[in-house]
Image (tube, rainbow, N blue to C red):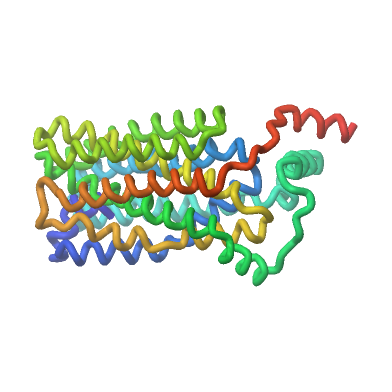
Amino acid sequence: MQNAKAAGMAKQLHLSSTDYSLALSIIFIVSIGRPPGVMLLLSCWYRPEELSKRIAMFYSASLVSGAVGGLLAGVITQYMDGVANIPSWKWLFVIEGCITVGIAGFAFFILPDYPSTTRWLTEDERILAVARLARAEDQSEVKMTTKQAFVASVKDPKTWAFLVAYVLIAGSGTISYFFPTLMGSLGYTGRNVQYMTIPIYLVALVISLSMGYNADRTSSKPLHFVVACCWGALSLIVCATVKKPEVRYAFICFGGAGIWSAVPLLLSNMVTQFEGREKRAISIALINGNLASIYGSYIWPANTAPLYHIGFGTTTALISLAALCMVGIMYRFPKVPTKDDSSDESEVRDEKS
């Protein structure tokens, strides 16, 4: 969407800044069910101490797609504008839409279900997958109906604490939808607007994966989240106060890396806080099903260009409050130690034999 805007969509359709934000909001609403589904599925396959780097890897796919999307958009903008009398921004939707539909059809046949019901696993693999998760869970858990799980989730203060934290960090993450616009404010034009977004995603990819791996290694997800938020906030303050384009570009990269490192750290911590599959599913849906991306798309009005003080200031406030919220969660809901049983898999195999 942002690449299409940079390629001339807003100008050709006479979209105001508010019109563009409304279009983004509609897209967010349509795709709002995807994140909670992914979080639930990952939590059904990996133990708590394994989730940070897995969720970071999942989010790295969006970073890679952002980098590839910037490259693809630059090529399409440069070489396909006017082909078959179609402007380049329309070709973006056609080509990227076809790629998405094709991958979705392929993914339907290879994505796993739950460990006990995935058809392409062998019986031994199913037993191992279920057993290793059972060792990390409370075996006295009582199965809940959907209504019971909903009531339990709503009554649990952790649900609302994590919801506030996620609303804040998700709102700050909407900066990514304005990267091409920000590149234009730094003086880049044409296809260079698209190409200059690529390093932003690559920097975020490296830092996000590194922090996810280290958070799992040290079992300190909340602390890593706070560090990532502080890093992002300081970077965005530099963006809001410095006018030199080269410096602003560098700290946009670091600010984006802070935000994208914080999101998977928060989610990997959150999915381990709710006992039972049913309650966890409801809690994840409630926390992820917020409207932060909708209001976040309105904090970058075009009339604040080129410095975008409102956007940078609001994003800095959101990510700083997210850090403070996590500090409160750390003190209010101290982490319950979990057994570090690195020999689980070998033990399960021994039991089977």
Q: Residue at x 35, y 51 (%)?
A: 96
Q: Quadrant of the N terminus?
A: bottom left
**Front-most of 285 and 163?**
163
Looking at the image, is 212 positioned above or below residue 313? Answer: above
How far across and down, in percent of the image, does residue 334 sit? 56, 43
**Front-most of 6 and 321?**
321
The answer to whether residue 110 is seen in the rendering is no
Residue ranking furthest to the bottom: 147
**Front-most of 139 and 33?**
139
How far across and down, in percent of the image, does residue 302 sit? 13, 56
Residue ranking furthest to the right: 353
Q: Is residue 332 left or right of residue 190?
A: right
Q: Quadrant of the C terminus?
A: top right
Q: Is residue 46 left or right of residue 261?
A: right
Q: Residue at x 75, y 27 (%)?
A: 343
Q: Residue at x 52, y 56 (%)?
A: 36
How far across and down, in percent of the image, does residue 48 sit? 62, 41
Count of labels in the image: 0
